[in-house]
Amino acid sequence: MSSAYDPIARLYDPWSASVVEDVSFYVEEALSAGGELVELGVGTGRIAIPTALAGANVIGVDSSREMLAVCAEHARAAGVEQRLDLRLGDLRRPPVDERVPLVTCPFRAYLHLRDDAERLEALAAARRLLRPGGRLVFDVFAPSREDVEETDGRWIEREPGIDERADWDLEAQTLTLSVRGRQGASTMTLWWLEPERWHSLLAEAGFAVEGCYGWFDRRPYSGGEDTVWVAVRK
Ligand SMILES: C[S@@+](CC[C@H](N)C(=O)[O-])C[C@H]1O[C@@H](n2cnc3c(N)ncnc32)[C@H](O)[C@@H]1O
């Protein structure tokens, strides 16, 4: 299994250094679910490590061996390796037999799914991991026209020494995202959807939408780029 994240596993943390707004939201969700969860697309543990430090047990699935290696290092450094069970695998077929009250998929990892068949496969897989009444919590985005116009095709310094370039295709609804820095470089594709489509897919996969927020402070969604979803297994 190879991943577009493998070459940037050492760049990922400095690249996402300013993304902090979602951490306390996901930690709260983990604790209010009783502290047992599966995180799909766990990455380097940006969210999983604080979640484990707060006392939760996390099964973390990711298709990038290198991201998981960095995550394991962070877990050891934080002294939470006993609370983090890291597994290499695809989030559409997670290597998890356990059943949990909470499945999360933070920071837009579902946007790596290219079409409705893949999305429904992933949502069905998340549903299978949940105990009855359990919750799937994730966030995604759909860009604004201003964001597209401002960034399209331009290298922009996102963090000191780390450049990012977004190539948007409004018709195909794809973002080809490139990043380069001292620790690595990569290009990956993300496929976005309007919130209404996520709503329909969740219903089709057997979820009831309990919350669709516009930000991690749980303000109701009222337009904008980000959506944060809390969906209950029916
Ligand atoms: C944007 S990162 C998010 C990482 C972490 N959850 C965070 O919030 O920082 C997306 C992660 O999803 C993983 N990923 C992408 N597609 C995947 C798939 N099909 N199965 C498992 N993991 C996947 C990537 O390897 C990457 O680590």
Image: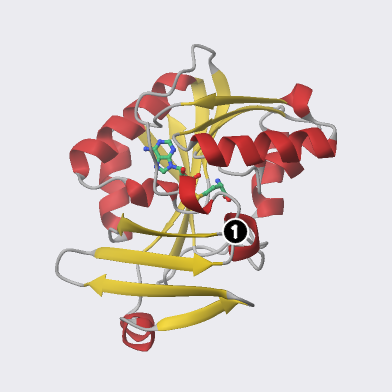
The front one of 206 and 138 is 138
Measured from the top left, where is residue 86 in percent x and y?
60, 26
Residue occupying image coordinates x 64% and y 62%: 217
Residue appearing at x 82%, y 39% in the figure: 77
29 and 13: which is toward the camera: 13
Q: Nearer the viewer, residue 139 or 16?
A: 16
Q: What is the residue that sits farthest to the front in this orientation? A: 182
* Residue extending furthest toward the right: 79
The residue sitting at 39% across, 74% down in the picture is 165
Report the number of numbered marks. 1
Q: Is residue 217 left or right of residue 90?
A: right
In the displayed image of the protein, which residue is found farthest to the left? 171
Residue identified by numbered label 1: 218
Give, as a three-letter code, the residue at label 1: Arg
| In-image side of 130 versus 190 (left or right) | right
The quadrant where residue 146 appears? bottom left
**Residue at the farthest top position:** 97
Residue 160, x across and y down, in percent:
64, 77
- Which quarter of the figure is the C terminus placed in? top left
Neighbour class for label 1 at 10 Å: few (<14), some, many (≥20)? some
Q: Taking the image as drawn, is residue 180 in sight?
A: yes
| In-image side of 183 versus 139 (left or right) | right
Q: Against 143, is 62 above or below?
A: above
> In the figure, 204 relative to 26: above or below?
above
In percent of width and height, residue 224 lies at 42, 73
Location of the N terminus (image quadrant): top left
In the image, 204 versus 9, the foreground residue is 9
Image location of residue 140, percent across then percent down: 42, 56
- Mark 1 vs ligand 1: CB below 8 Å: no
